[in-house]
């Protein structure tokens, strides 16, 4: 098992966006990633990033398509339904209305929820205000799922290429990972962590700690040779084999930190302050508004306390 110091050393100075020829990063703005997968017969977009930078995203997609002699999107893969992953989806669908959107059953239900859409708008506006000068309204109308993907589904792309769907819950109930075959490249989900260029690995256990551990074990069993990780990029090859074990170690460390503060006699507010002190930094603000971090932290701390404090 690689130590935290070795993980930091491996990530330092590494170019996570040095991608194979069949992948292209089309991300615009700060805080959410988007990648195009150029299969031999079709083009697939993985995630859409945030709403505030949709114009740049669409420009990047159009240019990448033109560079490959193409003019449309065939599929859009949703990792999950958070604002920083699907915020630009309504705008992308206005430009490419015939694209087939693939997501989990729960994703479809989330898009039908006015409460969920209000949260997307609120956090999308917070990101807009932090990262841009725009005052443009954040749209949530037009969010949709056309194909409900289930664990183990194979999405045939033609010419021997396909995508395997891997249910990867724990961060959200709608989190999915996708394995591109025969390329053996996996788009992981946020349920199995986010490495940071400056060294550590962030967990985001908003729904279920145990499910994230199972997701890590399930993804590891697929034996992918390449991992494209949300909010990070392509993982260094020397970390791929051990990545999911590293995630499990970090998840356990975070759980133990929270429970340890509870055992010291801290109340919820004090634990939140301690959690913020340990996991928030000015560096992190470059990719995530503090409002979103604190909202996630509340879910994580409450979940861990409820799950483990009486064990």
Image (cartoon, rainbow, N blue to C red):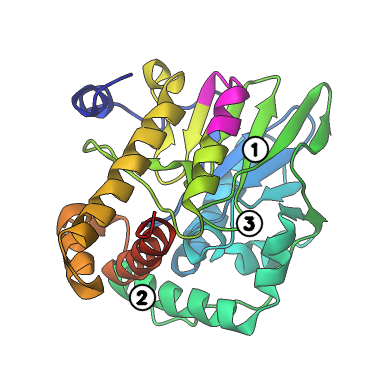
- In the rendered image, residue 228 lying in the magenta stretch gets the answer no
| Crowd band around label 3 with a 10 angstrom C-alpha radius: few (<14), some (14–19), many (20+) | many
Sequence order check, earlier mark of 2 and 1: 2
**Residue 72 visible in image:** no
Instruction: Identify the residue under disc 2.
Output: 126
> Is 220 one of the magenta-colored residues?
yes
- Helix or strand or loop: what does disc 3 sit on? loop
Residue 76 image position (x, y, % from top left): 69, 50
Res 67 → quadrant: top right
Of the residues tagged 3 and 2, which is closer to the observer?
3
Between residue 218 and residue 44, name the one nearer to us: 218
Q: Mark 3 points at which residue?
A: 174
Q: Residue furthest front?
A: 311
Q: Tell me residue 3's x, y (percent).
A: 24, 23
- Position of residue 89 in the picture relative to residue 109 (left or right): left
Label 1 environment density (alpha carbons within 10 Å; few <14, some 14–19, many ≥20):
many
User: Which mark is first along the chain, 2 or 3?
Assistant: 2
**Residue located 50% across and 57% down the image:** 49
For discs 2 and 1, the disc positioned in front in the rendered view: 1
Query: From mark 2 to mark 1, how far is it between C-alphas?
Result: 29 Å
Disc 3 vs disc 2: Cβ atoms closer than 8 Å? no
Check the picture and name the quadrant holding the N terminus. top left
Graded by Cα atoms within 10 Å as few (under 14), some (14 to 19) or many (20 or more), the crowding at tag 2 reads some
Q: CA separation, marks 1 and 3?
A: 13 Å
Magenta segment boundaries in residue numbering: 217-226
Residue 82 visible in the current orientation: yes
Q: Is residue 278 left or right of residue 106?
A: left
* Whole-percent x, y for residue 19 in the image: 48, 27
């Amino acid at each position: 098992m690689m130590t935290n110091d070795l993980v930091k050393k491996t990530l330092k100075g590494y170019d996570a966006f040095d991608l194979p020829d069949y992948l292209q990063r089309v991300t615009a703005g700060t805080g959410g990633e988007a990648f195009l997968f150029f299969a031999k017969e079709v083009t697939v977009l993985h995630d859409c990033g945030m709403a505030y930078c949709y114009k740049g995203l669409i420009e990047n997609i159009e240019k990448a398509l033109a560079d490959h002699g193409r003019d449309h999107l065939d599929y859009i893969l949703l990792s999950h339904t958070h604002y920083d992953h699907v915020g630009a989806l309504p705008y992308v669908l206005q430009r490419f209305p015939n694209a087939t959107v693939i997501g989990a059953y729960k994703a479809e239900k989330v898009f039908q929820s006015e409460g969920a859409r209000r949260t997307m708008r609120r956090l999308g506006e917070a990101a807009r205000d932090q990262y841009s000068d725009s005052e443009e309204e954040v749209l949530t109308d037009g969010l949709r799922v056309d194909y409900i993907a289930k664990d183990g589904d194979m999405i045939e792309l033609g010419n021997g290429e396909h995508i395997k769907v891997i249910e990867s819950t724990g961060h959200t109930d709608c989190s999915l990972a996708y394995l591109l075959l025969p390329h053996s490249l996996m788009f992981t989900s946020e349920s199995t962590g986010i490495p940071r260029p400056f060294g550590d690995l962030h967990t985001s256990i908003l729904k279920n700690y145990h499910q994230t551990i199972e997701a890590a074990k399930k993804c590891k069993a697929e034996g992918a040779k390449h991992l494209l990780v949300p909010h990070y990029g392509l993982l260094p090859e020397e970390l791929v084999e051990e990545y999911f074990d590293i995630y499990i170690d970090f998840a356990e460390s975070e759980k133990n930190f929270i429970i340890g503060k509870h055992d010291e006699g801290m109340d919820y507010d004090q634990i939140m302050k301690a959690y913020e002190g340990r996991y928030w930094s000015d560096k992190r603000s470059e990719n995530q508004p503090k409002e979103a971090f604190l909202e996630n932290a509340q879910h994580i701390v409450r979940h861990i306390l409820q799950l483990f404090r009486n064990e």
